[in-house]
Amino acid sequence: MSSIPNPITPEYLAESHSGRILAAAIPCTIIATSAVALRFIARLQVKAKIWWDDYTIFFALMFLYPFNIVLMVDAEIWGLGRHIPYLDESQVVKFLKALLTVQLMYFCQQAVIKTSLLLLYYRIFGTTKHYRWAIYAVGAIVLMWWVGLFFAGVFECVPVAAFWDKTIADPKCFNLIPFSLANGISNLLTDVIVLLLPIPMVWRLHMDKKQRMSLTGIFLLGTFVCCISIVRITTLQDYNPIDPTWNCVDIFIWTIVESSIAILSACLPTMRPLLGPLMRSRSNIHRSKGSNSKRTGDSGTDSTRAVWGNATPEINIKGGFTRLDEENAMSQLRGESNGGGVRSWVTSEERDSGADAESYPMAIMQKHAISQREDRPARVQLQPPSRVATRS
């Protein structure tokens, strides 16, 4: 926090934090862009359908670009990072216009990122009716949050021009600090709600505890974003409006980091197909170690092992995380399998694309791999006798 000294010295006027904005914006933009690019590469690698969760995260990236560009221009030309006495009147006006602009873009960007996550959850768990309604409810909360903050930000001053034109007589304006704290805290709360939404569904899957904890960790990657939001809120509390161009630098830096890491966290769960070569190499190592030991009827190191009793299926790397091993884990969740290996239901994505039962090679391969293993007999599926009506 900084206040204006009296008298103002040349050393004071020469101070600048403008470079810190550039140092944060440029690498964060690269990180977010790379995350979205890798997300689409992963989708194309497995020839999966690009869906609305992918489009919305791309839309969020399109909000990040002008957001960071405006801040960088503000730092280089309009005085962000310099002390307010250093600026002329036109720079102050442009700084305040930029402040209002990035504030509105921030609200839009955060809402779109949350929407992308909700659509990702719908893609994975959308076949469960009660969970669809939970997604709808949280989506309505996010929508109301965005509408309320966006219009409150637009009409922060009435008339609107009074936000940057201090010559307007008798304007009606919010106090900027309480408003910023309110939107920061509400943003954090909605983030927590969105992050916790898929956890109950993950723990209903018939997997061992280690796998459930692993999936929970993947869904909770956004916890780091919540930590950044808390830091951002603390910087808002330390803001001093006497020297706004100097004192808001830390707030903008943490806002840039928060937005970029939020995009990265939303993309990370979809990048599992890119880990396929690494996972296959590790699997080959395990198989080579297992080949040196004596096989028994209870050995289960084969990567084709699927659900038998308490055994746990291998997660389908090729299908990508957005599929969440639907061939086995989700069929366990719903209890809708057919013939012990091939599921008889489709996801909302597959229903839209018109996929049929022949498009599920992983489940078919698992079924035949198990039945053909030499170290255990094939499991026989007993069919109940059909009921035939007889006449006396």
Image (spheres, rainbow, N blue to C red):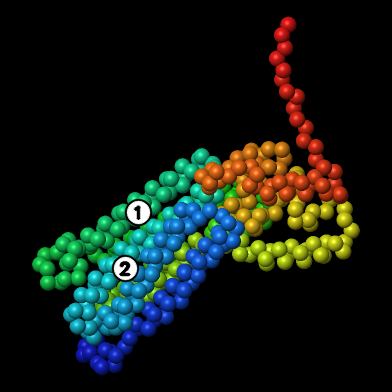
The numbered dot on residue 145 is 1
> 300 or 248: nearer the eye?
300
User: Dot 2 corresponds to which residue?
Assistant: 102
Residue 111 percent across, percent down from the top left = 39, 57
Residue 380 percent across, percent down from the top left = 80, 37
Crowding at label 1, few (<14), some or many (≥20) Cα neighbours within 10 Å? some
Is 193 positioned to the left or the right of 328 in the image? Answer: left
Residue 18 percent across, percent down from the top left = 34, 82
- For label 2, the SS is helix
Quarter of the image with the N terminus is bottom left
Residue for point 12% across, 72% down: 167
Residue for point 10% across, 67% down: 169
Q: Nearer the viewer, mark 2 or mark 1?
A: 2
Q: Is residue 30 visible?
A: yes
The residue at the far top in this view is 392
In which quadrant of the rendered view does residue 83 lie? bottom left
> 93 or 39: nearer the eye?
39
As shown in the figure, which amino acid type bears the numbered disc 1?
A: Trp
> 161 or 275: nearer the eye?
275
Residue 14 percent across, percent down from the top left = 29, 90
